[in-house]
Image (tube, grey):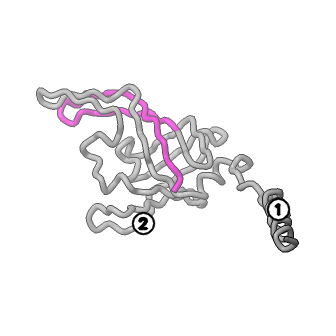
Amino acid sequence: MKFIKLILSLLIVSSLLLTSCKDEDKTPAPSNTNKTNTQKLVASNWLLTKATFNPPIVTTIGMQNFTFNELFEIPLIEDCQKDNLIIFNADSTMTIDNGALKCGTEPQTAKDGNWRFISNETQIEITNSAYFSLINANKVIIDQVVITDTEMKGVTDYVFTNPLTQVETTSKINFTFTKK
C-alpha cells in the first residue's frame, strides 16, 4: 500500500512540476519594425505575386476586345518569368534570380539595373532594368512603398500602347512582392 501511495505521490508531483513550468527563456522573434525600408528591402529576395491594373487595361486587337486586370494575364508574360526573384543589392544594383523555370539558356542570376529610394524611402526609382522594361524601358518610380516582414507593396503609373493601333491607355499598377 505504501508503494502505491508513493507512486501516486510521485505522479502528482511530476504532473504539477511539468504543467507549472514556464518557457521564460523564449524571446520573441525579432521584428523589422525598427529597421529602415532600405534595411528591409536589401535583406530579402522578392517575388512578384500580384500586379493589378487600376483601371483595367481594355484594348481591341482586330475585332476582339481584351480586358486585363492583372499583369500576369497578358499573354506576353511567360510562366518562366513568373517565378523570377528580384534582389535589391546594398550597392544600389539589382540582381534577377531566374527561378526554377528558366526561359531558354539564360543564366540562373543576372545583374539587372539600378535602384534607389527617393522621397524619404516612400518611393523606389528603378533604372535600366530588363525586369521592369514592360512598364518603362528607362525609369520606373514605385510610389507609396510599404515594406513589412513578409511583403512589399507599391504603385506605379503605366501607359499601355496597343501595338497595332498605337492607342494609349493610362493605368496604375498596384504591386505586391512577397519575401522569399
Q: Residue at x 44, y 60 (%)?
A: 96
Residue 145 numbered tag: none
Q: Nearer the viewer, residue 162 or 79?
A: 79
176 in relation to 108, above or below: above
Residue beneath disc 2: 109
Q: Is residue 162 magenta?
A: yes
Q: Looking at numbered disc 1 in the image, what kind of residue is underneath it?
A: Ile
The residue at the far front in this view is: 1
Q: Mark 1 or 2 closer to N-term?
A: 1
135 in relation to 78, above or below: above
Task: Name the element at disc 2.
Answer: strand
Q: Residue at x 18, y 34 (%)?
A: 164
Across and down, in percent, residue 20 comes to 83, 57
Across and down, in percent, residue 160 comes to 32, 33
Q: Nearer the viewer, residue 105 or 147?
A: 147
Residue beneath disc 1: 12
Magenta highlight range? 154-180
Between disc 1 and disc 2, the foreground one is 1
Q: Residue at x 28, y 40 (%)?
A: 74
Disc 1 residue crowd, few under 14, some 14–19, many 20+, Cα 10 Å: few
Disc 2 residue crowd, few under 14, some 14–19, many 20+, Cα 10 Å: some
Q: Looking at numbered disc 2 in the image, what kind of residue is underneath it?
A: Thr
Which quadrant holds the N terminus? Answer: bottom right
Task: Name the element at disc 1.
Answer: helix
Q: Residue at x 31, y 29 (%)?
A: 57
